[in-house]
Image (tube, rainbow, N blue to C red):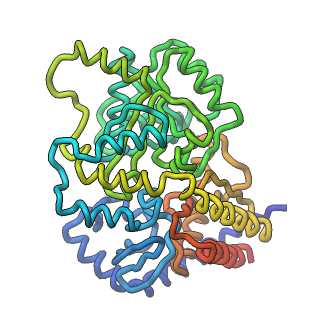
């Protein structure tokens, strides 16, 4: 029978680990104080303080899965930049491409000699024939929404409660509490986002039918699995229903694979034979430097071309100066050729299975009210006994003190997992010893928490 973790043990672990973190990291503390003189919240990007530590951990170097902080402490990294470094930090093919191409120009506002081969590789890997490059997946999702609205003549989009599509304001609409409303945490948003965004729970087929029935939705923007509120998997048959209903209502289906690419060399879409009208991929596509892509089917591309025949000339609102740059394409080519292959993914998935089983064994050993889930090379445990079926359920059981206690315990013992949820990635530099070290650390952590 599952046993609850005593609250007193969680509080005691958090207090002890906070003190230990401060003792271990005097240089990071000093750098934090110095950085606060010029950086908002003391960091180059404000969410870097969201690890929950007394001050940010400042990194000196990272290679493969090995991270060294400003105090010389070393870590095994299973967070991997929350997917941005999915193939390891500074992977050799990417470094080689940087060294080779660095002296040949970074950005020219013209296509590079790699353009044709990268387009071909994108089609071979992900199945869609026509592509564009942006700087981030957020930009890609914004562009896709605009194209879908333009060619359908429909204003609305549909997203899932607690979805994640980067910094796209239109997707931050929730039905927590029962009524659609903008996420209250959004900064500076003055529009009524519910005017053009419909939101439903993932895995709710009747709600999907109802939301699309009026045929006023340009596109459904979805992750194939929900990844930013724990990992929420689709029910059996859900993707089949999603595709059937969107086709029947002439609604475009866009799959954002940015976090799901760890599923396999063709993403979750390729592994499970999904048939989206559009496809978005960011973070790891160029080894961690800013780059993303979005692609469309032949049918959607034909509609775009027809729209462009009558479009008023001028600024489109799509695209930025550094998008499609020479260096982006060179690095994308290196990543696509070397890592988005079955041969590269096979050992990653094998190690992920080892990690999944190891965590499951620890949960069973301690009768902890937790569960573990895996998709491809991505593993996550949640501190709740039942798998949530949608974002609303998941949001109620994450970001709790117990998650923070586990993160801090592991961090102080040289293991990094994703701070916003309990996600771990396997990359080509990960070994069985690394996996076993994490599992052993989690076992020791639970031994203390459950005692």
Task: Name the spot of residue 286 as percent of width and height, x first.
Answer: 36, 54
User: Is residue 198 among what the camera can see?
Assistant: no
- Residue at the (29%, 66%) spot, across then down: 43
Rendering coords of residue 321 (x, y %): 18, 43
Mark count: 0
- Location of the C terminus (image quadrant): bottom right
Residue in view at x 54 percent, y 58 percent: 344
Residue at 23% from the left image edge and 65% from the top image edge: 39
Q: Quadrant of the N terminus?
A: bottom right
In depth, the one of 264 and 223 nearer the eye is 264
- Front-lying residue, 175 or 435: 435
Q: Position of residue 230 (x, y in %)?
A: 58, 52
Of residues 44 and 350, the one nearer the viewer is 350
In the image, taking residue 324 as reference, residue 448 lies left or right, namely: right
When asked about the image quadrant of residue 407, the answer is: bottom right
Residue 156 in view: yes
Which residue does the image show at 66% across and 72% down from the upper left? 439
Position of residue 64 measured from the top left corner of the image (x, y, whole percent):
45, 71
């Amino acid at each position: 029978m599952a046993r609850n973790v005593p609250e007193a043990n969680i509080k005691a672990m958090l207090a002890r680990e906070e003190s230990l973190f401060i003792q271990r990291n005097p240089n990071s503390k000093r750098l934090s104080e110095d950085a606060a003189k010029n950086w908002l919240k003391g960091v180059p990007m404000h969410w870097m303080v969201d690890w929950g530590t007394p001050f940010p951990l400042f990194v000196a170097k990272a290679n493969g899965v090995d991270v060294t902080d400003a105090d010389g402490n070393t870590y095994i990294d299973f967070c991997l930049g929350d997917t941005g470094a999915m193939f390891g930090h500074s992977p050799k093919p990417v470094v080689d491409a940087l060294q080779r191409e660095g002296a040949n120009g970074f950005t020219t506002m013209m296509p590079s000699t790699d353009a044709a081969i990268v387009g071909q590789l994108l089609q071979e890997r992900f199945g869609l024939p026509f592509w564009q490059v942006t700087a981030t997946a957020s930009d890609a999702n914004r562009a896709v929404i605009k194209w879908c609205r333009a060619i359908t003549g429909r204003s609305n989009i549909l997203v899932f409660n607690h979805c994640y599509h980067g910094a796209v304001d239109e997707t931050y609409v929730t039905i927590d509490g029962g009524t659609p409303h903008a996420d209250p945490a959004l900064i500076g948003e003055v529009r009524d986002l519910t005017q053009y965004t419909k939101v439903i729970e993932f895995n709710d087929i009747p709600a999907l039918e109802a939301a699309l029935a009026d045929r006023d939705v340009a596109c459904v923007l979805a992750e194939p699995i929900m990844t930013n509120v724990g990992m929420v998997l689709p029910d059996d048959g859900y993707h089949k229903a999603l595709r059937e209903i969107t086709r029947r209502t002439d609604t475009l289906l866009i799959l954002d694979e940015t976090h799901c690419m760890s599923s396999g060399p063709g993403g979750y879409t390729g592994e499970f034979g999904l048939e989206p009208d559009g496809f978005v991929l960011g973070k790891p596509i160029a080894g961690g430097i800013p780059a993303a892509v979005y692609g469309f089917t032949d049918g959607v591309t034909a509609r775009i071309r027809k729209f462009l025949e009558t479009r008023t000339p001028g600024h489109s609102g799509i695209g930025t100066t550094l998008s499609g740059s020479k260096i982006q394409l060179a690095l994308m080519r290196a990543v696509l050729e070397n890592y988005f292959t079955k041969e590269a993914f096979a050992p990653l998935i094998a190690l992920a299975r080892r990690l999944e089983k190891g965590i499951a064994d620890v949960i069973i050993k301690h009768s902890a009210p937790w569960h573990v889930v895996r998709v491809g090379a991505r593993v996550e445990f949640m501190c709740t006994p039942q798998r949530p079926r949608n974002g609303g359920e998941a949001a109620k059981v994450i970001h709790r003190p117990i998650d923070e206690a586990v993160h801090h315990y592991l961090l102080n013992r040289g293991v990094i997992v994703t701070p916003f949820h309990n996600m771990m990635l396997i990359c080509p530099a990960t070994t069985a010893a690394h996996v076993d070290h994490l599992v052993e650390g989690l076992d020791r952590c639970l031994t203390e928490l459950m005692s």
